[in-house]
Image (tube, rainbow, N blue to C red):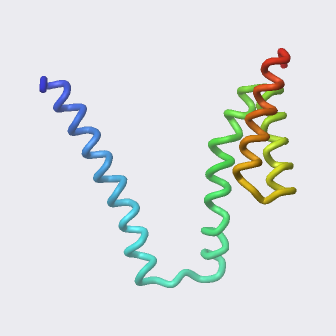
Amino acid sequence: MSGVDMLTLGAILGMAAVSFAVRASGYLVLRRVQPGPFLRAFLSHLPGAIFVAFAAPAVAREGLAGLVGAAVTLLVMARTRSATWALLAGVASFWAVRASGG
């Protein structure tokens, strides 16, 4: 490997080590400290908030097709409680709107 490749490998391994340390430290802390009701409620809502933070810009960037796809996904999920059907319906509606020029 050349010098640049070793530098890249070092950066990747360093980021992996830091990522693992952050995750492991959370588990270690929560093993010793019992979170109160407020913190438990906060943590239970966090995954959804993070997903929305990632999904909202992508939906907005895709315009009408993104909005229709997201809306269909949410409606199918609310009706069926099946992530598989919701994702299939959302992607199908996204591509249908995109193919129709929207």
In this view, the residue farthest toward the top is 101
Front one among 65 and 56: 65
Front one among 84 and 67: 84
Q: Is residue 57 left or right of residue 3?
A: right
Q: Quadrant of residue 80?
A: bottom right
Q: Residue at x 31, y 49 (%)?
A: 16
Q: Is residue 5 left or right of residue 52?
A: left
Q: Residue at x 79, y 44 (%)?
A: 73
73 to 41, vertically: above or below: above
Q: Is residue 28 left or right of residue 92?
A: left
93 to 46, vertically: above or below: above
12 to 85, vertically: above or below: above
Q: Quadrant of residue 39?
A: bottom right
Quadrant of the drawing holding the C terminus: top right
Front one among 33 and 102: 102
Residue 8: image x %, image y %? 24, 32
Q: Residue at x 40, y 62 (%)?
A: 23
Q: Residue at x 71, y 53 (%)?
A: 83
Residue 58: image x %, image y %? 67, 33
Q: Quadrant of residue 5?
A: top left
29 to 1, vertically: above or below: below
Quadrant of the drawing holding the N terminus: top left
Front one among 22 and 94: 94
